[in-house]
Amino acid sequence: MKNKIDSLQFIRAFAAILVANSHIWNDGILWGIINDFGGYGVDLFFVLSGFVMALTVKLNLNTNAQNAGNFLNRRITRIFPIYIVCVIPLLIYFTYKDGVQTLFFYLGNLLLLPSFDFDMTYRLVLGPGWTLIYEMFFYYVFSFILLFSNNKNKVLYAVLTVLFAMVLYVQFFHPEAEELWAISMLRMMGNPLLWNFACGILVYYIYERYKGKVDISLTKGLIYFAVLSCIAIVLLFFKFPRFVALGIPSFLIISIFVFINNRHFDNPWGRKLVFIGDASYSIYITHYYFELFRPQFYEWTGSMIYNQAVTRNLTAIFLVILAVVFGCIFYVLVEKPLIKIFAPKKVGTLEKRTP
């Protein structure tokens, strides 16, 4: 499979577990900055997404409209089936718990829509879904630009320009957007998180320029990964802007890992990591259930362990492990069959795995 880059599945596995850990084990013994570091997983996912879209976009159909439609169709059928399966039970649960909500509340949650006004009460019942709104926005921008050209470089340059210019425009001319909720349309359009997708496209150009010429060992890659992650923690601690603290290290890490040869993962442990990376979208989506019902687990385990600190930490560790295991099972039993149903045509391996 020519597009398979196993090292990126390692990054996906790390990112998914990091996010799950920060959501579930966030009131125990872990240092506060480590919990804040969970956002690093989102930046890594966004850079990966930008890279994969640039690498796998197909411009081989008869018209620009067909290329754009094909691209968007593949993204929608990849994102939504698994998301819908997970969000419907939560919509039912919160309707029962909080009462019937507005029509837009249900449409927005099902279709991953941002808020188009200044309503600070609008929320997604599946917490991590806010990042999927950003993902889908990136895909909409990408597919819109595909309508105007079938030249890959022109398309990618245009996407880069739009993402950088749009964020700067909102930052300069609508500073009030900073006060809005993350899933407000205006806030999203001015959020430097979108630059991570652009950084992923830049990684694609680095990869195309040096593939076959650069071969980084897994050991060196892990050292670079550890150093850059420590730098990210320090920058986060000193409250540098998120794009500087997490976005740029994510860009550098992905730029390094694309040059780690697949042979380094051709062993039992390597294949397990690749499998967890394959399951990263399922882990990312389903772990929220373990976060949501964590208080009930605390109550249950507290009846057996009388030290509350021990209860919180042991329960959280157990739930993180359980969330990862459950996500892997969900991947095998639900996600993979849904992929076969909604994306029957053979596509590039990387594109299949993109959340």
Image (cartoon, grey):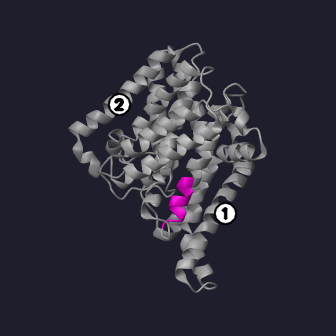
On the image, the x and y values in percent for residue 258 come to 59, 31
Q: Quadrant of the N terminus?
A: top right
Residue receiving disc 1: 322
Q: Residue at x 23, y 41 (%)?
A: 174
**Observer able to see residue 353:** no
Mark 1 closeness class: few <14, some 14–19, many ≥20 residues within 10 Å? some
* Screen quadrant of the C terminus: top right
The 10 Å Cα crowd at callout 2, few under 14, some 14 to 19, many 20 or more, is some
69 relative to 23, above or below: above
Disc 1 residue type (three-letter): Leu
Q: Is residue 217 left or right of residue 96?
A: right
Residue under the image location 65 percent in, 35 percent down: 352
Q: Is residue 169 left or right of residue 133?
A: left
How many circles with numbers are drawn on the protein? 2
Residue labelled with disc 2: 164
Instruction: Say if 29 sits above or below 264 in the image.
Output: below
Q: Position of residue 231 (x, y in %)?
A: 43, 47
Element carrying mark 1: helix
Q: Is residue 74 above or below residue 305?
A: above
Which of the two residues, 17 or 63, is positioned nearer the viewer here?
17
Magenta extent: 18-26
Where's residue 114, x and y in %?
40, 46
Residue drawn at (29%, 34%), measured in percent from left and top?
168
